[in-house]
Amino acid sequence: MLVLSRQRDETIMIGDEVEITIVDIRGDKVRLGIAAPREIQVHRKEVYEAIRRENADAARVQVDDLPAGDRPLQAHHRSRPGDAQGVRRRPVKP
Amino acid sequence: MRIETSRFGNVDVDEARTIRFTKGLLGFPGYTDFVLLEAGDESSFWWLQSTQKPDLAFVVTDPGLFVPTYKVPVREPQLTDLGAGSPDEVQVFVIVNKRENMLTGNLQGPLVVSVHQRLGEQLVLSDRRFTTRVPLMEIGSKMHAASA
């Protein structure tokens, strides 16, 4: 990790397109201003990590985890209301 | 098109129904294409099934069914990226998880999908009122009734 010291109003550049400015320093809290192109998402790391972990956990859910009424009786998949075309399932030929 | 799924076997889906998450979902960056499959009759839940990885699927739901106060801010640049003309053209889903007997929703990382262009993105909300595990529905009692 690169460690730099900056004072209020000073800026760091990351690559050509990302800028981080120290907007304010108050006690233990630093306010950072981040300028980055739209396609680069900027998030507090702990929130990003929490979502990433939750996605990984949720990916383990199986059909049996849902209430009985919510399991496909014969895996037929109808259109959602308002859909012009839905999901159709044909039996797999033996 | 026919897709392979680990949970439902081979399923025929209309390719036009594909939802593309151009950045993938957090933690699953390589998988962009998904379809929505219904979970069953009168269900509040759908399966968001990857068309690229048979065992990759998420239960999703409309958070408005469970948390009426939940609102997801979608900014202009995000609307543009999704090809949506207005927030009315965007549908919000949340990924559902199961912990013990509770189904929970990740309201901190909702999925927003443009209904016409069928482009999606997982947002990271900074509003700390909503967590990654908001209780939606307890399932223990319903399962007992079903087996009676």
Image (spheres, rainbow, N blue to C red):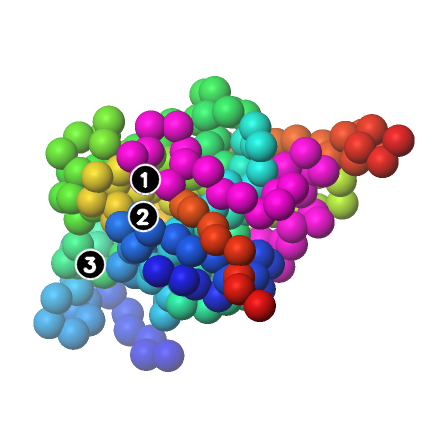
Q: In front of the other: label 1 or label 3?
A: 1
From the image, tell me which residue sits under label 1: A85
Q: What element carries label 3?
A: loop
CA distance for labels 1 and 3:
32 Å
The answer for which chain carries disc 3 is A
Residue depicted at x 37% and y 79%: A1
Q: Do labels 3 and 2 share a chain?
A: no
Q: Position of residue A9 (x, y in %)?
A: 17, 55
Look at the image and tell me in which quarter the N terminus of chain B lies: bottom left
How far from the left and from the top, in percent, is residue B64?
46, 25
Please tell me which residue lies in front, B119 or B67: B119
**To which residue does mark 2 refer?**
B17
Nearest the eye: A68 or A6: A68
Horizontal side of A64 relative to B148 (left or right) equals left
Distance in Å between CA atoms under marks 2 and 1: 8 Å
Q: Mark 2 lies on which chain?
A: B
Bounds of the magenta segment: A58-86
Q: Residues at badges 2 and 1 in contact (C-beta under 8 Å)?
A: yes
Residue designated by label 3: A39
Q: Are the numbered discs 1 and 3 placed on the same chain, yes or no?
A: yes
Task: Tell me the amino acid under the disc marked 1.
Answer: Gln
Q: What element carries label 1?
A: loop
**A28 in relation to B62, above or below:** below
